[in-house]
Image (cartoon, grey):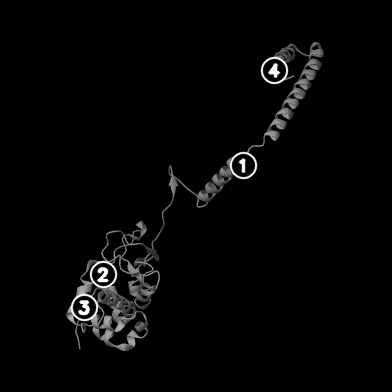
Amino acid sequence: MHKSSTWIKRLLNKPENAFMCMVDMSYIQDKFNLVGLENTLPDYESALRVVLDDAPLSCAATNTASRSAAELVYGLVHARYVMTPRGVAKILEKYMAGCFGHCPRENCKRSAVLPIGLCDIVGENTVRIFCPRCMDVYIPPSGVKGAAVDGAYFGTGLPHMVLMTRPEYIPSRPRGRHVAKLYGFRIHDSAYDLQRNSFTEFRRSMQQPPSFTSTATAGITSTNTSTTAASSVVSTTDAASTTTTTVSSNASNQTSRLVHMINAYRRAPLLKR
């Protein structure tokens, strides 16, 4: 019985595998835990021997295909192992030490995160980080060791298995969220939607061709209306002038000013007669 595998130690010492944990040799040697993996690649048996240090040293060290296949087998075994009580305990050790990084959200106050895969199929996505405080998924910041490993090596359910089986590690939810303000005034939640809809309507109206016929008709109608209104005002002024002898001097002065304004209006160049 192997207590540990030299090949696994070398694999986990690489910076790109910093998120992964050591899988117990007894777990890998139990064929029941590996059911179904034999169909993942054609040279499964030789790759498994590399993982268990049973392959010849020259073959394991020089054959690139064997190393890649062995890394794939170990990654798939790792995804199953971390869902066991022993695997959850090892993930928790890394979680408490902050090995997976911290949540980038301001209100989470650098809460520790857990690794998660967006898909259980190898080659689809790299690993992501899950924040137990805000319950959201983020892309690890660039430069984080281990952030380039395949997300399928952790699976889509790892953080939830950890928190469901060890609820004492569930942090409290953030108390508040960011409040949008402009010049000290709070912006309503629907303000951005209203602004976007208004801009969309404005852009749609600018893209429509102008109607010259309607504009010309409106201009003629406006001119006729102005001429009629001016004639009505003049008629009213003439009637007021005939009655100035029966009103007070103040009324006469007001009427004179009104007549002067109307005459000026009639002489205006904008009025076409």
Task: Place residue 133 in its image quadrant.
Answer: bottom left
Q: Which mark is residue 208?
A: 1
Number of disc labels? 4
Residue 87, image x, y percentages = 29, 79
Residue drawn where x is 41% and y is 54% of the image = 178
The three-letter amino acid code for the residue at tag 1 is Gln
The crowding category of the residue bearing disc 4, from other C-alpha atoms within 10 Å (few below 14, some 14 to 19, many at least 20), is few
**Circle 2 SS class:** helix
Residue pointed to by mark 4: 265
Q: Earlier in the sequence, mark 1 or mark 2?
A: 2
Cα gap from disc 3 to disc 1, whole angstroms:
70 Å
**Circle 3 SS class:** helix
Cα gap from disc 1 to disc 2, whole angstroms:
58 Å
Q: Earlier in the sequence, mark 1 or mark 4?
A: 1
Cα gap from disc 4 to disc 2, whole angstroms:
87 Å
Residue 62, image x, y percentages = 20, 74
Q: Nearer the viewer, residue 114 or 244?
A: 114
Residue pointed to by mark 3: 60
Residue 243, image x, y percentages = 81, 14
Cα gap from disc 1 to disc 4, whole angstroms:
37 Å
Residue 116, image x, y percentages = 36, 70
Q: Earlier in the sequence, mark 3 or mark 4?
A: 3
Cα gap from disc 3 to disc 4, whole angstroms:
102 Å
The three-letter amino acid code for the residue at tag 3 is Ala
The three-letter amino acid code for the residue at tag 4 is Tyr
